[in-house]
Image (cartoon, rainbow, N blue to C red):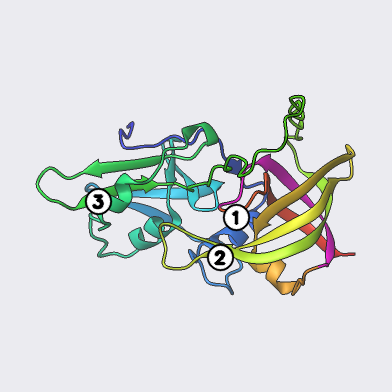
Amino acid sequence: MIYSFVIEPKQYELFETEAEQIEKCKEWSLISEKASRTKSFFYRGKGLNLPCTIIGYADQMTAVIEFENKQRHCIHPSFLKEMQAANYGQKALLPAVELAEAADYAAEGETAVIEASKDSEEVTVSALSAVIMDKPEAAAEEAPKKSKSKKAPKLQLPEEKVKMTATVKELTTVPNNFSDNEDEVIIYEAVSIVDPELELGDAWSSHSATLKKLELEIGDTITFDAKVVAKKLTRHPVPYKINNQAKIQKV
């Protein structure tokens, strides 16, 4: 059976190991911090009760689940968590105005889908994955006329995990439009890939449970294996995001 409500992920990261899956589920509060294994999940709503598996993520606020028919679907972790309740209601209430303001950044693999209920002013959220990224503002001041500078060529980022080094520049939070709590992130400087040798400059990552155990402070340098993608941080001019950090060590 093909499910018509499915939002196929355009760009996403698959979990390479069960350990990565467990860590991400803990970050999303889908399992307890003491859990040593994941559990069975169900997609409920629309009269359905479908078993599903969390196989990866499109971004920090978008889980990718797979049904038994192999269809893959984007869903906000908070909604998936609510669906695990046996008495889960079919409607998640959010102000229509807030949802209307959600921008669709499909080019970055982020999708926001809103279904308007015909018999009510409420809206049903089937899946929301919208990380609203601030666009860089134009230069505030005009400099004296100079010859037009050429844009630096885009860096060719490796697609696989690579060994990296980075120095903690800032520990901060960014707004989460679908939660009362802000997301904790780390901003790094002097970020570089060891092999192939490549200087990235500034980058960011989520402040995961694993990283918190290291009790990092500003100025600490760490090494790790990770994937890096071109993705700006909300309200910060940081162009690259570091995903799936593993083998993390302080230098």
Residue 213 against residue 88 in the figure, above or below: below
Residue 6 against residue 151 in the figure, above or below: below
Query: Quick one: quadrant of the C terminus?
Result: bottom right
Q: Is residue 230 magenta?
A: yes
The residue to which callout 2 is attached is 26
Q: Where residue 57 sits: x, y (%)? A: 54, 47
Residue 239 against residue 86 in the figure, above or below: above
Q: Earlier in the sequence, mark 1 or mark 2?
A: 1
Q: Amino acid at mark 2?
A: Lys
Q: In the drawing, what numbered circle is on residue 96?
A: 3
Query: Quick one: quadrant of the N terminus?
Result: top left
**Mark 1 to mark 2: distance in Å?**
9 Å
The answer to whether 141 appears left or right of 31 in the picture is right
The answer to whether 140 appears left or right of 211 in the picture is left
Q: Earlier in the sequence, mark 2 or mark 3?
A: 2
| Secondary element type, mark 1 | helix
Outermost residue toward the front in this view: 144
Q: Amino acid at mark 3?
A: Ala
Q: In the drawing, what numbered circle is on residue 21?
A: 1
**Residue depicted at 25% across the width and 65% down the height:** 87
Q: Which residues are magenta?
A: 219-234
